[in-house]
């Protein structure tokens, strides 16, 4: 059985492979028979006296390391050595200078005589490195030599590519990160903003407009100021948990959760009082400071770390229970149901300032006509304290009104398309879906109002006047391509 | 007159057929681009680093070869990539997907477009192999003598052209560009790109470059 030799020569590198031919498919007529088994590999490099010599393991390691290193040269992304399967790790390549690449070869017979146990270290220039890569590429491309070898190139996965690859960007990135950290630190002390819907927006929570107009034109401030918990529970549309057993169970859970994470070591200066909302599963879904110290020291309490943020896009539909939690400086804490707390000491809502109602109610009472009663409150969106007219904002109502409005406009829109920009209108409809009034919202809409069907369907609203009855506001956009868009003005509020 | 004209047409037809014989692998758009595998990207669009890297390598080629930008279009035609890169404007728009550019386009680069640019890039790099090798050898010699890379006439000319190209086209307000505000940092970038161009010239250089463009970008 005779061996065959293959040689791949480049200016700075010569690769000589010696091996057996493929005896199974041996064809004597073949000029260049297939080498199927590698015996010995020699790598002659410019600048070293003795070539790197080794068996199959050495050559496998050489090809793997050099190939991966070539990729690293191109991308600058280093693949950690433990990731790929170079079992022996006999050959390692690393960059040691701007133009110097170091190849380290640990001979596979370290026991032999001690002289050869020291690893061979070769420093290559970029051009020499390339010649080595090219010699390997030519070998891999050669179908007559070890044809089962292939390069198996693959991009380095994201998880192995720390952003050190873009070292040049580190300084600006660091500035960005630190400013984010500063902003984070500054915002950390702030309470989670609570969404508070103005009272009048919820038609269900109000008496009907006609009834209130006739019965009590000037409601007393005390009766219109409901306690905060009731108001917010209604506004958030999150049903409160009413089952006393469940409230007690959640209370115990909350207490345990907090006690395990709170001690005197937190060093709070005075008692911190919070209103804490707990979901059915016992998770803290929200908390709000109830005194000055609580606002400043929330970071010292375990609340921020226990807060479970709702998954965006999913309405927080679960029921909640609210508790009054006070952290004492001595490391103890108190948890009581919020309902019980507020029943004894009602907290007036800050948003419901009682001074406003008396100031507007006198002007309402002498003029019971709807138009006049609407005028003192310039915009229902800004100061919706009047109980006369409510805006329909419930998503279910809007969903039924939207197609009605759309159908009316589409049917009437027969005008030729003579405009080039979107025409945006604010359109208000009553609860039956009839168009009450409209208002151009952009310049193009004002200029082209007559090519839309709106003037034929209703009257144009004069500056921010409030309709006489409950209404829903929609945004209607006429597009130059003939499309019509109708959407709730305030979006779907839930 | 008639005889001469017919002979010239004959010569043209001969040269055309020879070209086809010489280039059995160059060929219609899909085949040449098929030699590059599709990277496992989620959105099928090239990441930022891929876009800047391709553009920077092309910039280095333009600094090496004064007619480089013309050459890109000629190679695109020769490799029958006209369907992807039909004209100068398209080429400019594709290269402007580099986020470092002053005229950065908001669009991304499709995988097909990136493949076409890489095929052209490697083709041009291969033609410049001798120059690239020579410049890198010079650079190494200068480093050994602890001299500045600008001490060699040819290397200095390349570096100067690269710096000029870079500064005239890249937006200095971008963080990635800010890192190259000094001559030294730009020179280093230009030399690094030379090394990368050399690796592109090899037998599997095109595949190696293509795969490396997605290092650290795939899941």
Image: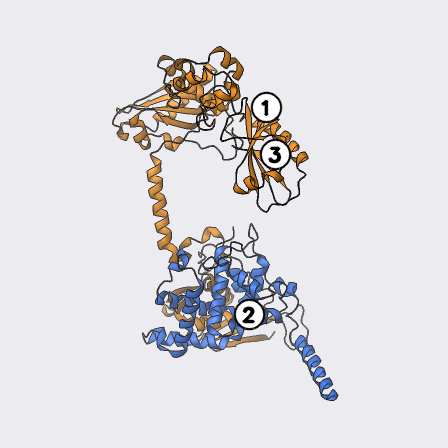
User: Which chain is in blue here?
Assistant: B
Question: Would you call the spot at circle 2 few (<14 residues within 10 Å), some (14-19), or many (20 or more)?
Answer: many
Percent coordinates x, y for residue B114 in the rendering: 56, 60
Of tags 1 and 3, which is closer to the observer?
3
Of tags 3 and 2, which is closer to the observer?
3
Q: Where does label 2 land, which residue?
A: B72
Is tag 1's residue or tag 3's residue first in the polypeptide sequence? 1
The residue marked by circle 2 belongs to what chain? B
- Residue B16: image tag: none
Percent coordinates x, y for residue B171 in the rendering: 42, 59
The residue marked by circle 3 belongs to what chain? A
Q: Are marks 2 and 1 on the same chain?
A: no
Q: Judge by depth and name the residue closer to the eye, A288 or A103.
A: A288
Cα distance in 3D space between marks 3 and 2: 57 Å
Q: Regarding mark 1 in the picture, which secondary structure is present there?
A: loop
Instruction: Give the residue furthest to the top.
Output: A215
Q: Are marks 1 and 3 on the same chain?
A: yes
Q: Where does label 3 land, which residue?
A: A454
For residue A45, above or below residue A485: below
Answer yes or no: is residue A260 visible.
yes
Answer yes or no: is residue A105 visible.
no
Q: Judge by depth and name the residue closer to the eye, B157 or A271.
A: B157
For residue B14, above or below residue A390: below
Give the left or right position of residue A100, taking residue B18 as reference.
left
For residue B211, above or below residue B78: above
Of tags 2 and 1, which is closer to the observer?
1
Question: Would you call the spot at circle 1 few (<14 residues within 10 Å), some (14-19), or many (20 or more)?
Answer: some
Drawn colour of chain A?
orange
Cα distance in 3D space between marks 1 and 3: 18 Å
Give the left or right position of residue A137, taking residue A163 as reference.
right
Percent coordinates x, y for residue A116 in the rendering: 39, 69
Q: Where does label 1 land, which residue?
A: A431
């Amino acid at each position: 059985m005779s061996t065959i030799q293959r040689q791949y020569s480049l200016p700075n590198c010569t690769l000589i492979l010696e091996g057996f031919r493929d005896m199974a498919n041996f064809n004597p007529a073949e000029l260049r028979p297939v080498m199927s088994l590698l015996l010995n590999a020699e790598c002659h490099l410019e600048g070293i006296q003795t070539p790197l010599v080794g068996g199959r393991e050495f050559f496998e390691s050489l090809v793997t390391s050099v190939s991966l290193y070539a990729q690293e040269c191109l991308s600058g992304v280093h693949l950690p050595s433990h990731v790929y399967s170079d079992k022996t790790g006999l050959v390692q390549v690393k960059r040691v200078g701007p133009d110097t690449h170091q190849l380290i070869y640990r001979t596979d017979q370290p026991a032999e005589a001690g002289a050869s146990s020291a690893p061979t270290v070769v420093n290559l220039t970029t051009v020499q490195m390339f010649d080595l890569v090219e010699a390997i590429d030519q070998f891999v491309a050669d179908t007559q030599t070890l044809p089962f070898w292939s390069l198996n190139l693959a991009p380095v996965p994201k998880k192995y590519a720390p952003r050190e690859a873009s070292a040049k960007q580190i300084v600006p990135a660091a500035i960005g990160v630190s400013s984010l950290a500063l902003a984070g630190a500054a915002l950390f002390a702030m309470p989670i903003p609570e969404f508070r819907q103005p009272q009048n927006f919820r038609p269900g929570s109000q008496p009907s407009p006609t009834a209130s107009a006739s019965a009590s034109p000037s409601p007393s401030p005390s009766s219109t100021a409901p306690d905060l918990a009731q108001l917010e529970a209604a506004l958030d549309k999150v049903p409160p948990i009413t089952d006393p057993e469940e409230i007690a169970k959640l209370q115990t859970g909350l207490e345990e959760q907090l006690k395990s994470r709170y001690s005197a070591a937190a060093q709070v200066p005075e008692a911190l009082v919070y209103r804490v909302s707990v979901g059915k599963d016992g998770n803290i879904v929200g908390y709000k400071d109830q005194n000055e110290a609580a606002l400043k020291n929330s970071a010292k309490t375990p609340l921020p770390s226990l807060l479970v943020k709702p998954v965006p896009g999913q309405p927080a539909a679960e029921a909640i229970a609210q508790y009054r939690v006070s952290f004492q400086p001595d490391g103890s804490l108190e948890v009581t149901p919020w309902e019980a707390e507020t029943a004894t000491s009602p907290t007036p809502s800050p948003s419901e300032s009682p001074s406003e109602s008396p100031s507007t109610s006198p002007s309402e009472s002498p003029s019971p006509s709807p138009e006049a009663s609407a005028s003192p409150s310039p915009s229902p969106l800004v100061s919706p304290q009047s109980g006369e007219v409510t805006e329909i904002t419930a998503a279910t109502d809007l969903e039924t009104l939207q197609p009605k409005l759309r159908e009316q406009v589409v049917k009437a829109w027969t005008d030729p398309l003579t405009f080039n920009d979107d025409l945006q209108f604010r359109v208000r409809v009553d609860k039956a879906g009839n168009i009450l009034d409209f208002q151009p919202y952009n310049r193009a809409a004002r200029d082209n109002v007559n090519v839309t069907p709106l003037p034929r369907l209703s009257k144009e609203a004069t500056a921010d006047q409030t309709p006489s009855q409950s209404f829903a506001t929609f945004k209607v956009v006429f597009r130059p391509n003939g499309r019509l868009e109708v959407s709730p003005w305030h979006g779907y509020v839930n | 007159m008639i005889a001469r004209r017919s002979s010239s047409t004959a010569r043209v037809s001969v040269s055309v057929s020879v070209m086809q014989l010489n280039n059995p692998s160059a060929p219609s758009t899909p085949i040449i681009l098929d030699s590059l595998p599709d990277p496992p990207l989620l959105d099928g669009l090239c990441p930022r680093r891929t876009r800047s890297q391709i553009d920077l390598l092309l910039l280095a080629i333009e600094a090496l070869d004064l007619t480089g930008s013309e050459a890109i279009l000629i190679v695109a035609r020769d490799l029958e990539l006209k369907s992807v890169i039909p004209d100068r404007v398209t080429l400019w728009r594709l290269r402007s997907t580099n986020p470092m550019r002053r005229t950065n386009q908001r669009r991304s680069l499709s995988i097909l477009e990136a493949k076409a640019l890489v095929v052209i890039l490697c083709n041009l790099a291969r033609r410049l192999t001798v120059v690239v090798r020579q410049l890198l050898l010079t650079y190494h010699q200068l480093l050994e003598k602890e001299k500045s890379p600008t001490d060699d006439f040819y290397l200095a000319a390349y570096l100067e052209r690269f710096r000029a190209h870079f500064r005239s086209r890249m937006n200095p307000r971008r963080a990635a560009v800010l890192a190259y505000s000094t001559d030294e940092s730009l020179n280093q970038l230009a030399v690094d790109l030379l090394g990368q161009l050399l690796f592109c010239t090899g037998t599997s250089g095109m595949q190696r470059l293509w795969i490396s463009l997605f290092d650290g970008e795939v899941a």
